[in-house]
Amino acid sequence: MQFIVANDNGNSEQKISINGDYYKQPNVYQIYNNTPTEVQPLESVMENLLNNIIVTIDSRAVSQTPSTYVIGKRALEVSNTVRNMDIKRAKKHKETIPVINTLSFLAAYATKKQYEDKKKLEHGEVIEVEVIMTTALPASVHNEFTKTEFANTFTDHYHEVKVHFNNTHTIVKVKFSEVKVVAEGVPALFNIIEDGKGNYRDDDLFDHFRETYDKKDLDGSYFADKRLLHVDIGDGTTELTFTQGYKHDNGKSTGLDFGLGAALELALVPFQNEMEKYDLKVKRQDLSRYLKNKESGFHDLAVTCIKQNLEQLVEDLEKAIKDRTSELKLEFDVIVVYGGASIILKDELYTRLVEHFKPINKEILWIPAQHAVDMNVLGMQIFNDLTYSN
């Protein structure tokens, strides 16, 4: 098998596209000592395999000895303590979680595809996978050294993954033939300008922008040569990436060592106290999910618990953005805001930015909630299509 992969390892979620198939999973894992023994119909097991990933990984990129892990959604279900990205360090290129979760998901996906093709799987069946992958590092740490180090973590090692299901397993051998590491924000640019089908983007991404700035016929071509300051607000960091055209200017890009994560951690205590009424244990990822989903029955409670801490985050972000634009001597055209945390910050921060920058003819493109978390990974997918399509 050959996979063309776009892979965005966020502090909260991993967003991954494999040959155009797009998935999200909580970016967590736990070391696990149990493997499935109950035998269920193979068809139903395979249908739900990507939500029940249990693997044993043999890779020096992860550990000196093989270890068994439970990944993503399943990890949140079976363990009260999970391992996730360190929101304080922001050194993704040195963490093992992007490697563990990427290998695990690719191996489970390969197993599922093998079953769909053959309608059966032998015990210990070997599946060989060659991977071409585009992934990203925060602009604040992206340089020649870190991107090479991160790419080599995948390309320089032998990776063998046992995918456990029922009372059997497959063995997936994963070889990364090419890994391209870009700065976060650059892939989003592809997703702003293009629609992935060879045309300029022209959809609801720009609805609010068109109305605010009276640009009724605007499409993605408007941003093709603009100087953009990307503000990607995540859980652990906020990236301020400067692009013009399709070029990233590292000297004009930076990062902030804070995001929604600290506010989530502080709000988790009162939220957990309330959730104990329902005999529920929650984690940071759960609270983040409730905040972003207005349809959740726990959304209002989550907002109440985090409100005070959000006010401080809004103040910090507003100051940081204004400081950065001053350092750039106002030599930019549009501030583009996205990332999972932008969804719950818009009500407080958007109007402040518009009112501050509109008098000096600087514009704010606030990416709508339905697109905010997907900007980087879908941009990588467009980049892959342009680069690797036959």
Image (cartoon, grey):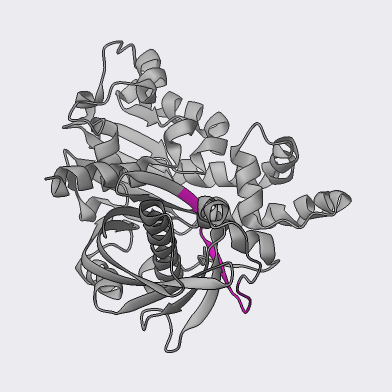
Q: Quadrant of residue 187?
A: top left
Q: Quadrant of residue 104?
A: bottom left
In the rendered image, the vertical position of residue 33 relative to residue 346, given as above or below: below
Q: Is residue 352 left or right of residue 275?
A: left
In the rendered image, the vertical position of residue 355 relative to residue 82, given as above or below: above
Q: Is residue 93 left or right of residue 279?
A: left
* Outermost residue, left side: 390
Could you tell me which quadrant the N terminus lies in? bottom left
* Outermost residue, right side: 277
In the rendered image, the vertical position of residue 239 relative to residue 229, given as above or below: below
Q: Nearer the viewer, residue 25 or 109?
A: 109
Q: Nearer the viewer, residue 151 or 234?
A: 151
Q: Nearer the viewer, residue 165 or 65?
A: 165
Residue 271 spot, x, y in % from top left = 76, 50
Residue 331 spot, x, y in % from top left = 23, 37
Q: Nearer the viewer, residue 220 or 210?
A: 220
Q: Quadrant of residue 165?
A: bottom right
Q: Residue 342: within the magenta?
A: no
* Outermost residue, bottom side: 64
Q: Residue, x 24% and y 73% (percent of image)?
A: 155
In the image, the segment drawn in magenta is: 24-35
